[in-house]
Amino acid sequence: MRILCTNDDGIHAEGLAVLERIAAHFSEDVWVIAPESEQSGASRSLTLSAPIRVRKDGPKRFALSGTPTDCVLIGVQNLIPGPAPDLVLSGVNRGQNLAEDVTYSGTIAGALQGMQLGIASLAFSQAKGFRAAGSIAWGTAEAFGPGILQRLLEIGWPADVVMNVNFPDRDPADVRAVEVTEQGLRDHHIAFAEMRTDLRGQDYYWIGFKGTLSDPPEGTDLRAIYEGRISVTPLHTGLTHAPTRRAMSGLLGGAPPRFGPLGP
């Protein structure tokens, strides 16, 4: 099996080293193609307005000046000789990728690009922020990652789906279950922009996230991680909301409407 590992935390990230060790359980043909610097929040962005520089960082190992999407695209098409990878692994992200956050995530994007190229793809994230500040339970992802991956490969999944795996912010001994979940939706917005002033008196903004929890329903990725379970969520890029499409087709379909008064 040929495996491509990428991430959005950068080529030197601790989570990427964890991912490499997970991959090593399955193959000796492991390629690492990751951003030179952190690309968290890059989502599926492609670098279109600047050249992408490639630095060889070791055998089967490259750092790119672009995004996770760039890494997978260029890795598969240009950097890995011979057959394409059989599997793309993205992560292990420093922090959870849950609910609406998956649309921001460069980690998820790396897996989506693999899927778009016809390669089975998974994203791994290690939750943080639920216990001591600054402490990340990398041992949990490393302990359970190989078994989760093996079972998913045995089961299989559709070609247009990526598997989003989140490990809870608990020590391995405190993790009791795996749950196949749906993508949740928080009941409040956690992203915010804080205005600061630099030493020259110029204002700038720093975007971050509030640590407040939602009250999600059972069966969601949020609830599973809050309660210490490993969350496995099948994701796909089909964003059409079918009920709205069906309801609106009878009201808007047919001849194009002409503009006119909207009413009193």
Image: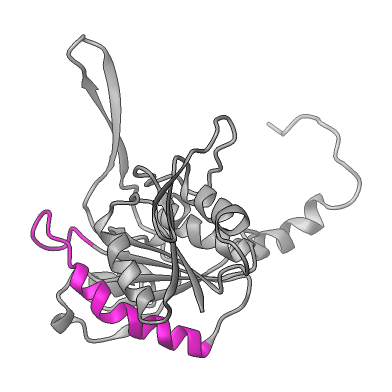
Q: Work out whether 174 lies above or below 90.
A: below
Q: Residue furthest front?
A: 59
Where residue 14 sits: x, y (%)?
24, 58
Where residue 251 sits: x, y (%)?
79, 53
Q: Nearer the viewer, residue 194 or 35?
A: 35
Where residue 263 sits: x, y (%)?
71, 33
Is residue 216 in view from this perspective?
no
Q: Residue 132: name its quadrant.
A: bottom left
Q: Is most of the magenta stretch helix, strand or loop? A: helix
Is residue 91 in view from this perspective?
yes
Residue at (10, 54) in percent of width and height: 133
Q: Does residue 159 appear left or right of residue 210 in this picture?
A: right
Where residue 17 sits: x, y (%)?
29, 63
Q: Nearer the viewer, residue 255 or 141?
A: 141
- Determine if the magenta segment contains residue 135: yes
- Determine if the magenta segment contains residue 234: no
Q: Nearer the viewer, residue 169 or 140?
A: 140
How many numbered discs, if any?
0
Q: Residue furthest left?
A: 132
Q: Residue furthest top?
A: 200
Q: Does residue 224 appear left or right of residue 245 in this picture?
A: left
Q: Does residue 241 appear left or right of residue 210 in this picture?
A: right
Q: Which residues are magenta?
A: 128-155
